[in-house]
Amino acid sequence: SYVLTQPPSVSVAPGQTARITCGGNNSGSKSVHWYQQKPGQAPVLVVYDDTDRPSGIPERFSGSNSGNTATLTISRVEAGDEADYYCQVWDSSSDRVFGGGTKLTVL
Amino acid sequence: QVQLQQSGPGLVKPSQTLSLTCDISGDSVSSNSATWNWIRQSPSRGLEWLGRTYYRSKWFNEYAVSVKSRITMNPDTSKNQFSLQLKSVTPEDTAVYYCARAAVTTHYFNYWGQGTLVTVSS
């Protein structure tokens, strides 16, 4: 089965840039999607198809995907960005697969 | 704007059937441009896609291998909703269950229900 690996936690100071990685075998050949989840809430799509943002998502959120790693980049981090972030792909053998999640802490 | 509203019991006894419903507003369960999904989240299993139902001239259901023998999803066009039934539950099925919408030909979920915590316990 296809596995997506994320670091359990990332910490960043306000105003700095946070980078959250998502590792998967040849992930660059797949479309990677990212979700933000705050406590007690459902996930919210923040990046889809590697680099696209849904309407209403700030330009501070961006994505990239190459080789075996996809990255969610959050520029000019704010306190309100503190949340869990999950990557997700579709794999022909594993259906829809989610990463284990990364807790972003804003110091 | 699509909205998904979930309903169903929060406590199910072991070996019984878990049943949840997702009411759709702002779209149609019979839409040819959407699929209707169930996803669950638990500390031990993380986010896990369970299955989807969708209409393309006829109804289709696709289920995750992990639950395929126990799961049923049904659309209800008269009520514009879809349902999840998971039979023979065990404590390992304790999780927050979400319904979610995906657009046709995409594999990401752009609308989610509010989530329902289902506890399997006697």
Image (cartoon, rainbow, N blue to C red):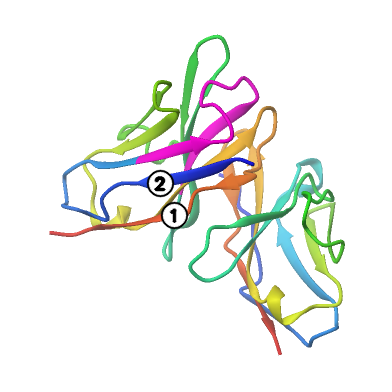
Mark 1: which amino acid? Gly
- Up-down: is A73 above or below B88? below
Side of A35 where B13 appears, left or right: left
Q: Callout 1: helix, strand or loop?
A: loop
On residue B79, which mark appears?
none
Q: Callout 2: helix, strand or loop?
A: strand
Q: Is circle 2 on the same chain as circle 1?
A: yes
- State the image quarter where residue A80 is shown: bottom right
Residue B70, horizontal then vertical, whole percent? 30, 35
Q: Is residue B23 magenta?
A: yes
Q: Which residues are magenta?
A: B21-39
Side of B119 where B68 appears, left or right: right
Residue at 53% over, 24% down: B54
Return the disc, 2 or 1, that comes first in the chain's sequence.
Answer: 2
Side of A15 where B93 appears, left or right: left
Residue at 71% over, 59% down: A23
Q: Are marks 2 and 1 in contact (CB under 8 Å)?
A: yes
| Within-10-Å neighbours for mark 1: few <14, some 14–19, many 20+ | many
Q: Nearer the viewer, residue A20 or A55?
A: A55
Residue B23, horizontal then vertical, whole percent? 43, 38
Mark 2: which amino acid? Gln
Q: Which residue is mark 1?
A: B115
Q: Which residue is mark 2?
A: B6
Residue B103, horizontal then vertical, whole percent? 66, 33
Q: Chain of mark 2?
A: B
Residue A30, horizontal then vertical, whole percent? 76, 42
